[in-house]
Image: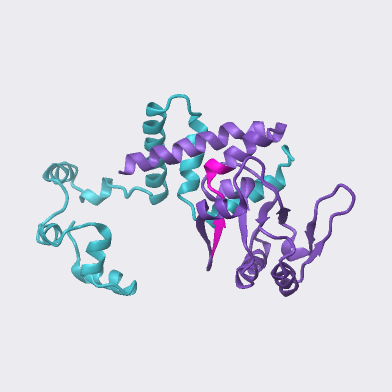
Amino acid sequence: MHISPAKLKSLYESKEMHLKRLLSLAGVSKSAYYHLLYKDTLLPDSLHRIAQILEVRPSAFLEEINPDEKKMRKILSLTDKISASRPTLDRDNIRHTLILLNEKPIERLRRSLIRGRKLNILQ
Amino acid sequence: MAENLIFSSKEISFLRELIKQDVKFILVGLSAAALQGAPVVTQDIDLWFKNLADPGIKKALKKVGGVYVHPIGLNPPTFAGDSVKLFDIVSTMHGLDSFDNEMCNSIKVSLGQIQIHVLKLERIIKSKETVGRAKDRIVLPVLKDALETIRSLKKLKT
């Protein structure tokens, strides 16, 4: 596994970006990028050795983390951190607030209205 | 489908027209809290107007096919019409400073192409504590937890 500069270029150009802008937005330095670019493989040697024994490519047992799962894992980890520092707060309230903060304001409002209009308990 | 969305282009058009007419208003109540990330539910979007007699309100209503209904009996003024049915009129906020002071302290939130003034979460809490109705007391712990969560998150990021 290595970086394909051609594939990467077509991706950032499709978003009307230059490499410099991409790296700046991603917070990746130019030297870090070129270091990765010139590596023969981005995977640790241990994974290649395991693949060799199994007579498969490393990709046969690697899985990309679903972006939604990644986002939720981050929220849950933040929930733990905040809950630990503020034990009097309700964990569900922390988690739901963090979930909503990941949405655009208009989506937060829509969610509250949809639920409010479907479930008229308080008013 | 966009037409089936709750809070869609119809409602945004009304807010845009209010801004265009230079009507001074702040979004308050639970919808304002929801915009800031509080996990609460609400039926309406409360708009606190500086001056209900501002002719810009009627002009904005006319543009979107809504009407202003004057107070009847003990009922407060309200809007009528499909494009404004989600909005509720607020003329007084308890426990807060003057409209102008609260406007200065409000935050600006983007809703699509427009930006509106929204009452800060801590001020929403203050107002609900002052009013203290049963439905306010129920929601206050959630609002307070949301505020503390937002503050803790800011601390973690700095």
Q: Identify the residue at image location x=37%, y=28%.
A: A85
Q: On the picture, is B106 further left or further right than A71?
A: right
Quadrant (top left/top right/bottom left/bottom right) for the N terminus of chain A: bottom left
Q: Is residue A1 above or below residue B81?
A: above
**Span highlighted in magenta in the image:** B115-123
Residue B81 visible from this viewpoint: yes
Of residue A74 and residue B143, the one placed in the foreground of this image is B143
- The spot of residue A112 in percent (x, y) is 62, 47
Tally of numbered tags: 0
Of residue B4 and residue B111, the one placed in the foreground of this image is B111
Of residue B26 and residue B30, the one placed in the foreground of this image is B26
Q: Identify the residue at image location x=65%, y=35%.
A: B130
Q: Is residue B155 above or below residue A64?
A: above
Q: On the picture, is A57 further left or further right than A86?
A: left
- The spot of residue A20 in percent (x, y) is 21, 68
Quadrant (top left/top right/bottom left/bottom right) for the C terminus of chain A: top right
Residue B38 visible from this viewpoint: no
Q: On the picture, is A68 further left or further right than B80?
A: left
Q: Identify the residue at image location x=46%, y=42%.
A: A98
Let me know if residue B116 is in the magenta part: yes
Q: Farthest top residue?
A: A88
- The spot of residue A77 in percent (x, y) is 37, 36
Color encoding of the figure: by chain
Let me know if residue B44 is in the magenta part: no
Q: Could you say which chain is coloured purple in the image? A: B
Quadrant of res B48: bottom right
Q: Is residue B115 above or below residue B131?
A: below
- The spot of residue B81 in percent (x, y) is 79, 64
Q: Could you say which chain is coloured cyan in the image? A: A
Q: On the picture, is A122 further left or further right than A88?
A: right
